[in-house]
Image (cartoon, helix red, strand yellow):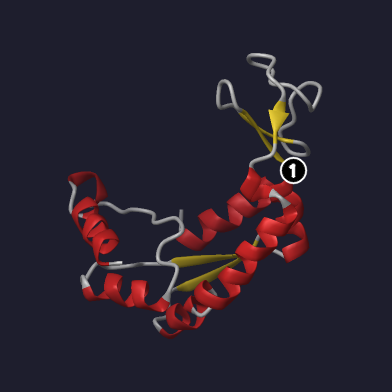
Amino acid sequence: DDIVIGIIKDRLAEPDCKKGFILDGYPRTIPQAEALYSLGIKIDAVLSLEVSEETIIKRMSSRRTCAACGATYHTVFNPSSDNKTCDKCGTELSMRADDAPGVVKNRLDTYHRETEPLKDYYTEKGILRTIIGQDKIEDTTALVWAALGI
């Protein structure tokens, strides 16, 4: 954690962060949040995207990647033309190992155990914004912008 917080501290001191920044997936634990807070860096808002486990598992296990060119697809939201091969290079698409339903479930268990307590931490600081992310991508995006005042 000390190494990561040092990297974050250095990065947030860069000129392009003066008008704002987004941390995605950090902090993940209370100690990480406390370390970030101890830096004295102002956090205006923390977003919590609320999505059912069933939806998360379905969305993640529907992602596909091309091992040859790195293109990414989603079998529902952004499918390739035949939902099997890459439109860019013709290579067969595959699911990332960490998108398999059982692996996603394990990741969610870790989230509930280690990261979910951050909701209370940031609620106490008055900066938690909860976004319902069950709906269409466009609707969720609009809710995110609204929560950020953009």
Indicate the position of residue 15 as horizontal and vertical percent values. Answer: 18, 46
Q: Residue at x 70, y 28 (%)?
A: 93
Q: Which residue is mark 1?
A: 62
Identify the residue shown where x is 69% and y is 17%. Answer: 87
Where is residue 28? Give x, y as percent: 45, 68
Looking at the image, residue 7 sits to the left or right of residue 132; the answer is left
Q: Quadrant of the N terminus?
A: bottom left
Q: Residues within 10 Å of mark 1 (few under 14, many from 20)?
A: many
Taking 131 as reference, is 73 above or below it?
above
Q: Position of residue 32 (x, y in %)?
A: 35, 72
Q: Quadrant of residue 4?
A: bottom left
Q: Say which quarter of the image contains residue 10.
A: bottom left
> Image height check: is 80 above or below 38?
above
**Which residue corresponds to the image point at 61% horizontal and 62% vertical from the top-left?**
107
Indicate the position of residue 131 as horizontal and vertical percent values.
Answer: 60, 65
| Residue appearing at x 69%, y 39% in the figure | 95
Q: Is residue 57 visible?
A: yes
Taking depth in this image into account, of 21 and 116 the one nearest to the observer is 116
Disc 1 marks a residue whose amino acid type is: Ser
Residue 26 in the image: above or below residue 73: below
Residue 134 seen from this side? no
